[in-house]
Image: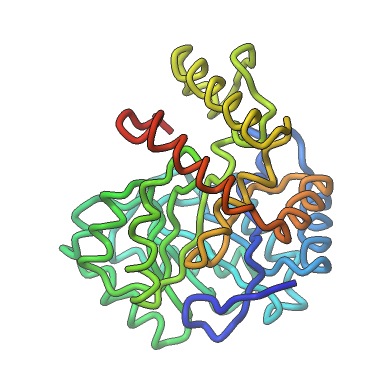
Amino acid sequence: MKTINYAKTGKKIHRIGFGAWQLGNTEFWGHMSVEEGIELVDEAIKKGINLFDTAPGYASGLSETILGLAIKDRREKVVINTKFGHTAEGETDFSVFSLRDQIQSSLGRLQTDYLDSIVLHNPSMDILEGKSTHVQELKKLKEEGLIRSFGVSIDTFEEFDTVLKNLDIDVVEILFNVFFQEPASLFEKASQKGISIIAKVPLDSGWLSGKYDEESEFEGIRSRWDDQTITRRASLVKDLKAMVRADDLTKYAIGFILSYPEVTAVIPGIRNLEQLKSHLKNGDYILPQGIKEKMQDLYKQKIQKDPLPW
């Protein structure tokens, strides 16, 4: 299993990470007990996954808590990336004066005395433009050893470009998949700055697995899509299925992202052992260059000038 250096921490990670939004999250993803979550994380570690992406706001802190219980006897074997700005209590607080307190709260739930990385969770543009003292404070916390690296979690090309022009950071977590390809043009610049790139939402909230079509009905966070968006995404999924001659698109979607050497890791959500096994297998799949070019052409022809809403 190939590994790659992560965010100037001295640690190496597998390029398939573990998106931990689903851990303990019964609101969106159905029932998962604490014991089931621990078992899932334990199995992931045994199989070689060691990057775990979580946040205080995931399941009101339970995602971090489950991770903490699962890793407490093998902390140095794993890399934990958590977030700042949305608290376990459901509040939004990007105040630089609460950085330390929010980190300490995450450390408590994770049962550790340091974070491998922390990212500002979709902060405002003024922070991305360097008009605040967040980076200075994060550097102090890094010197103290509370964190080993830091960065931002963002969604758009414009935000990514702004960050690269204004902030001295270690990690960028960016929305990037077959349907959202614009950030790719900035990957080389980020890599040259020594920034680790984590690709989030790799399956477009399930569409790029191939399991949805125009007849699908959605609940929870997925109910954000209107009928026009559903019809358009369904048409694009059909195009992809015809392109790869398969109904299950998951390995092709993950393979597309990992075909960019600048991408450090991808973090699909994992909520059961079957998904874990599938993603581990996908991590070894190498996407043929011809299919990659067809996916790039699909984006240019049908999405680039009229971007999909997330």
- Rendering coords of residue 11 (x, y %): 59, 82
Quadrant of image for the C terminus? top left
Residue 128 lies, in percent from the top left, at 25, 59
Relative placement, left or right, of 57 versus 96 is right
Asked if 188 appears above or below 250 in the picture, the reply is: below
In the displayed structure, 103 sits above or below 217; it is below
Image location (x, y in percent) of residue 81: 54, 65
| Residue at image location 83% in from the left, 68% down from the top | 46
**Quarter of the image with the N terminus in it:** bottom right
- Give the residue at x 62% y 50%: 254
Judge whether 185 appears above or below 203 on screen: below
Which residue shows up at 42% across the image and 68% down it? 171
Q: Farthest front residue?
A: 290
Q: Residue furthest left?
A: 131
Residue nearest the viewer, comparing 282 with 64? 282
Left or right position of 179 against 160: right
- Residue at x-position 37% and y-position 52%: 183
| Marker count (numbered) | 0
Taking the image as shown, residue 61 lies to the left or right of residue 172, namely: right
